Amino acid sequence: MYYRENNLQEATSLVQEGLEELPDNAPLLYRACAYHLAAGRLNEACRYLETALILDYEQHTLLYDFFPDLQVQKTIAKIISQFK
């Protein structure tokens, strides 16, 4: 809901709270990655992405569900390909 309202700070904070309770939850990590990307924080996004890929590579397609445009984002694609 916060993301849809373009409130990235609240969306990120909410996901962070969830990760404090469930730190190994890959879908939350992928969502955190997506929100950080949307906010222009590439380093943080990559850190969350790498952790999520280690935990559950198969769910990396969730990123494309959140942000279809990421399929052409070279940095993200490169990181994902390293974990195949």
Image (spheres, helix red, strand yellow):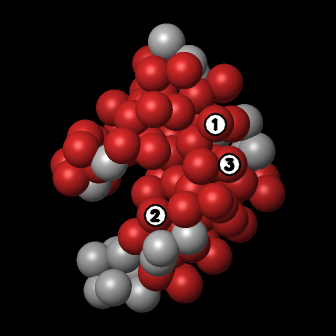
Q: What element carries label 2?
A: helix
Which quarter of the figure is the N terminus placed in? Answer: bottom left
| Nearest to N terminus: mark 2 or mark 3 | 2
Q: CB atoms at circles 2 and 3 under 8 Å apart?
A: no
* Amino acid at pointer 2: Leu
Q: CB atoms at circles 3 and 1 under 8 Å apart?
A: yes
> What residue is shown with label 2?
37
Left or right, residue 65 beside residue 62: left
Task: Name the quadrant containing residue 51.
Answer: top right
* Amino acid at pointer 1: Glu
Rendered view: 60 above or below 39 = above
Instruction: Categorize mark 1 by other alpha carbons within 10 Å: few (<14), some (14-19), many (20+).
Output: many
Residue 50, numbered circle: 1
**What is the residue that sits farthest to the left in this orientation?**
68
Rendered view: 58 above or below 29 = above
> What residue is shown with label 3?
47
> Looking at the image, which is closer to me, 68 or 79?
79
Q: What element carries label 3?
A: helix
